Image (cartoon, helix red, strand yellow):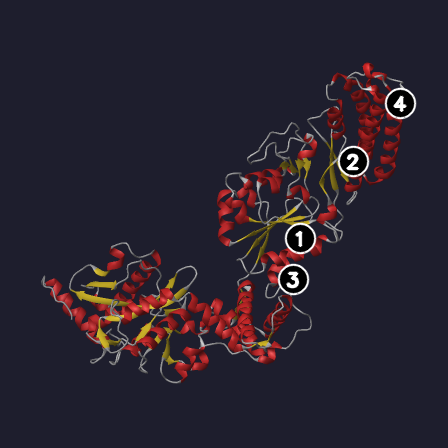
Amino acid sequence: MLNRLAAEQLSVAIDPAWLEPADTPADNSTWIGQPGAWQAAEFGLQLRQPGMHLLVEGEPGSGRTSLMLSAMRRIAADWPAAADLVYLHHFSAPEKPLALPMQAASGALLRSGLEQMTRELARHILGQWQEASAGMEPGARSEKTPVAEAGPGSSALESVAALLDARIAQLKREHSAHLLQAAAFEGWLAELRQDLLDQLQQLHLSSEPENQLEVCLNRYRANLLVDQRYLCSNGGAPVLHDDDPSLASLFGGCDASENQADVLRLRAGNLLRAHGGMLLLHLSDLLADTDNNLLGRLLRVLRNGRIQLEETVSGQHASALAVKPEPLPLDVKIVLIATAEERDQLHDTLPELAGFFPVKVDFSERMPANADNYRAVAAWLRARCQALQLPACSTGAVVVLLQAMHRKIEDQRRLSTHFGELQQWLIESAAIALQQQSPQIQAAHVTDAMQQRRLRSALPEQGFRDAIADGEILIRVTGEAIGQINGLTHIDLGDTSFGSPVRISARCSAGAAGIINIDREVEMTGPNHDKGLFILQSWLTSQFVALTPLSLNAALVFEQEYHGVEGDSASCAELYALLSALACVPLRQGVALTGALNQHGDVMAIGGVNEKIEGYFRLCQQLGLDGEQGVLIPESNLGHLVLDAEVQQAVAAGQFHLYSMRDVLDGLACLSPMPIGAPDGHGHYAEGTLLRQAHDTLQRLREYHHHNRVALTP
């Protein structure tokens, strides 16, 4: 059945009453239209067992990162506070520094206490040296230090020991209660005391005792690798987002400086800093860094449940560590952000790593177009206007923005969840409102912003239209022609996409080759197009079953198409061109069409319907609308129409027309002045119909082929 569409069918109507303010404001932490993703995220983030990490799948701009970070911070705030981590010099095994976990925010106090102790010891020891040197006769001075020369039991050494004992006692009082391994710390303090006294007695062997004293005291300083004061200042467990992961930022390592003790050069990566909490990563970043094999290293960490600080760090001044810290237990929940393509790549390259992410959080690209979601999006727009200090959105502007969300996914029943692009539209519309000194963003500002965005990328489309207008590309939009028709293509250039007509022509002769697509013969077609061509041949054979096998050589071609053809959306147009050539019946050239065919003659939905219609409309507008032009589309695409206002107005004024078809023969009736015809019980068609004329031509071609004669149709 063929239907002429009214202007009211060409877009989606939104009742302004649905946009009344919601009870609760919406912001970037509101999961609008993502109930499944929200439920999965809540479930996965609450799981504390090892190996229960989250894979978040969604497209950029869907809010996947901001929403997950908001949920992670909210949930981690109720988790136990994570520990600080301090590294100390290991006196009995210098190559394996001592790791001391401490209560949150107490590591900095210990580091400060040890710093203060080393400064006091340095002042005290240097002061004694100066006093002793000042009391010596000028000729009696030597390179030996007074403290070292005194030996055990001397007053100088006893003075140092007394100061050291007092500071050690103070450190125990102030910090042992905050340590998770107090006994280890107290044992380390005892070793520190003995080490310093032993070192002081060896300083006389050095030609630079003051420098050696500084080196000695450096070993008593603490390296605070993980400081929870900066990771979770509001309590709870840390939540980190590494948006530029590298070997050092993720796994840690050491600084290249040679001016510090090895233990002080160690640096924690974000995996270790997020211990006890959560870490968000983007899979695309890990896949891109193949030089450092970040994915393989992450797999080892998750498999072992431990992290080893890397022995070397890449860079201009890379150097090997003289220390090899023991691997540390790691308890961190990783949230991995990915697209569907990146997820597939992970499963193909490292399926074992993919197995550590059993909880999938799937962000949908669309949501139902109902009053609740309309109201939520309207509230989100108001909140963004306030957050970005933009003029407020009028109700009319909200309606146009919502229609743009329908248009984004070509669906009158659903809205896009691409809030990143919605915010871009909002900012561009606000810029125009401010230029016009309007206190509010009005519908006209949004429409103008969208038109300006299209025009900024319209040069390729304009080039196609100009080539047609100049006669370089042969397209007719008026009159009739036999064996040719205007199909519609969808051209995607990455940053812009548009629809454009392409002439499809057919020629027939007697033979046994069947339907030949010239583009396919020169390998300029894709598999989906080839599939559509075989379906076309199947339909044609079933329609004229009495004449099978058909004695037909039919050549189809997309004229002046040099970049290849893919997709089956032109299969209806190819069939019409072929039937026109067989029946010698002209077709209207002012009506372009798009639609895919199945074996039963049903017309199936195609993609890019709005851009195809608008592209053809703009061409006809440039060449001159005559009131007869239009586009024929599948009936199943009616719910995808969200056309711009200019097309709607032209249809309402009768300057341009849109038709829909359910069966392929319905569409043919729109293009041909001749009745189409239908087979009777014996497969015969009535005289004076298009299909009867096609049948008669096929019969003649069959006879000619059997007598080795060739007849060309016009």
Q: CA distance from mark 4 to mark 1?
A: 57 Å
> In the image, what residue type sits under mark 2?
Glu
Q: Earlier in the sequence, mark 2 or mark 4?
A: 2
- Residue receiving disc 2: 115
The residue at the far bottom in this view is 653
> In the image, what residue type sits under mark 4?
Glu
Q: Is residue 244 left or right of residue 621?
A: right
- Residue receiving disc 1: 45
Residue 149 image point, x, y percent: 83, 16
> In the image, what residue type sits under mark 1?
Leu
For the N terminus, the image quarter is bottom left
Q: CA distance from mark 1 to mark 2?
A: 40 Å
Residue 99, placed above or below residue 45: above
Q: CA distance from mark 2 to mark 3?
A: 43 Å
Q: Nearer the viewer, residue 428 or 90?
A: 428
- Residue receiving disc 3: 29
Q: Nearer the viewer, residue 612 or 395?
A: 395
